[in-house]
Amino acid sequence: MKYPLYQIDAFAKTVFSGNSACVVVLSHWISDSILMQIARENAVAETAFLILNEEGCHLRWFTPDIEMDLCGHATLAAGHVVLQHLQPERNSVHFQTMSGILEVQKQGDRYRMELPNRRPQPVKLPIEIAEALSIQPSEVMKARDYVLVYSKESDVAELVVNRVLFDRINLDPGGVAVTAPGTQCDFVSRFFTPQASILEDPVTGSAHCSLAPFWSERLNKQSLEAKQISERGGEMRCEVEDARVLLYGHAVTYAEGHIQV
């Protein structure tokens, strides 16, 4: 079978930045084993599989290793594909996902994405994570992902993760966000996943389901400007509500074509 495929740079205004995701458009669900093989062959952090039919829009996310319960940048990428390529007359799309109904909406030259609020709570840092870090955090929080809080941006930028030690822990399907107040924005972050094909995720929308509520309370602000300071980097605006987090970001198409499986 031949399926349309798009490669999108999410949370980016230009290609070669933000976080790259592949979006594969299906007519019906195929086996999970084939979905996983496609994700591995695509060799990007996330592949989104999308079905558009009379029943609505259905979305699933796969890394090269596992199926995820939520992926922000691949949701943004899928929204861009629907609203820019497949049905450009629409202004919004609602995806049925493992994490509930997620909306992506056009907002001028960017998109607004609605994700669940996953406010983190204080926890103890596992020794496997602590021993892998070159700099220790001042606070440790957790929802799906661990949130390690640092006092200054330079600590986050300079942090080194020892992958051999880090891979001793399995957080399936979560990861570790490291964060600090920003010098030119409200907060900065990086995101790491143990036992994954890609150690550091360039831009992680789903992590902001916890990062944004944390910094909203800490800074007493509902609207925040965030930057993920990975090598590729990405920026977004976050608005925090009781049950949801709204993320605003850009997306650009890098490639489009077909796969044959």
Image (spheres, grey):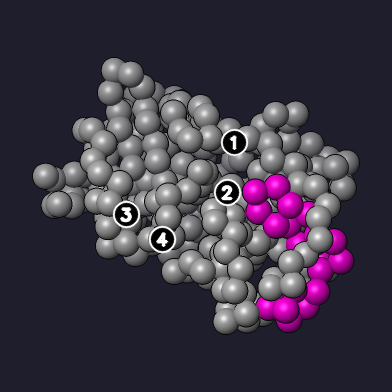
- Residue furthest toward the top? 54
Secondary structure at badge 2 equals: loop
Amino acid type of the residue that numbered disc 3 sits on in the rendered structure: Met
Find out whether the residues at labels 2 and 1 contact each other: C-beta distance under 8 Å.
yes
Point out the image quarter for the N terminus.
top left
Q: Residues within 10 Å of mark 3 (few under 14, many from 20)?
A: some
Q: Please give the label number shown on residue 205.
A: 2
Identify the mark nearer the N-term, 4 or 1.
4
Q: Nearer the viewer, mark 4 or mark 1?
A: 4
x 87%, y 47%: residue: 219
Answer whether residue 193 is magenta in the image: no
Q: Please give the label number shown on residue 36.
A: 3
Residue 136, placed above or below residue 37: below
Q: Residues within 10 Å of mark 1 (few under 14, many from 20)?
A: many
Q: Position of residue 106 (x, y in %)?
A: 49, 31
Span shown in magenta: 130-150
Amino acid type of the residue that numbered disc 4 sits on in the rendered structure: Asp
